[in-house]
Image: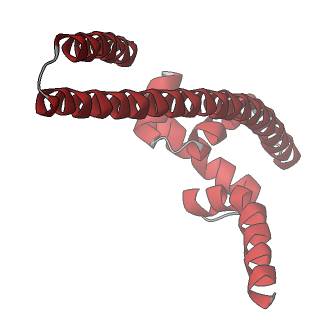
Amino acid sequence: MKDLVIIGLLALIICFKLFDISSDIQLGIPQWHIAQEAMLLVLTVIGAMYLSYDLIRRSREVKALAKRLEHADKKIDNMSTQMRSARQEYSQAVSQQFETWGFTKSEQQVAFLLLKGLSFKEIAEVRQTKEKTVRQQASTIYGKAAVDGRHTFCAWFMEDFIQEHNQDLAANEAA
């Protein structure tokens, strides 16, 4: 908006300057004075043209940026939808694996919280049980899953993703 005000003021100055020069010519003012005012008029016209061009250019850039932002927002919305869907599918796959291992409902709850990275103390607080109970359930979970601890238990669920990633890296390096 301020650019339009400046351009408007410059256009007004140009009009007044043109009127002043034509009045000076009619009044017989010395040529050097008319040349000086003409030079100021030319500089004002150049400045107004430059500002007008710059305003139009920036306006186009803002519109292009707005379109890119809108497009990016749509992509993020799609990605969020995809991520929610993938998270839900992964959660279902984990639940199925828990059932395959024969986890009880409370063991499943503890196992999910272990996978989320909560400590035994935090799990006990969330489940309103004793930490010792959580430790015993975790030990049972590790035994049923045939792993030797929390890290191996968590890694069991990530192994397939890491393996695929390593295969992708190896394929890219070979190419």
Task: Give residue 5's quadrant in the image.
Answer: top left
Q: Position of residue 86 (x, y in %)?
A: 79, 39
Residue at 78% over, 44% down: 94
Q: Quadrant of the C terminus?
A: bottom right
The spot of residue 28 in percent (x, y) is 16, 17
Q: Is residue 120 above or below residue 34?
A: below
Query: So how many labels did they put on this image?
Result: 0
47 lies left or right of 118: left
Q: Position of residue 169 (x, y in %)?
A: 73, 77
Image-quadrant location for residue 122: top left
Q: Quadrant of residue 10?
A: top left
| Identity of the residue furthest to the bottom in this view | 174
Q: Residue at x 70, y 32 (%)?
A: 71
91 above or below 145? above
Residue 170 image point, x, y percent: 76, 83
Between 122 and 73, the one nearer to me in the picture: 73
Residue at 56%, 61% in the rendered image = 151
- Which quadrant, please, contains the N terminus? top left
Residue 130 visible in this rendered orientation of the protein:
no
75 and 170: which is toward the camera: 75
Q: Is residue 159 left or right of residue 66?
A: right
What colouring style does the render use? Answer: secondary structure
Residue at the image point whose x is 79% and y is 68% from the top: 164
Q: In the depicted view, which residue is nearer to us: 8 or 14?
A: 14
Q: Compare residues 136 and 174 and report the one nearer the observer.
A: 174
Vertical comparison of 30 with 163: above or below = above
Residue 66 appears in the picture as rendered: yes
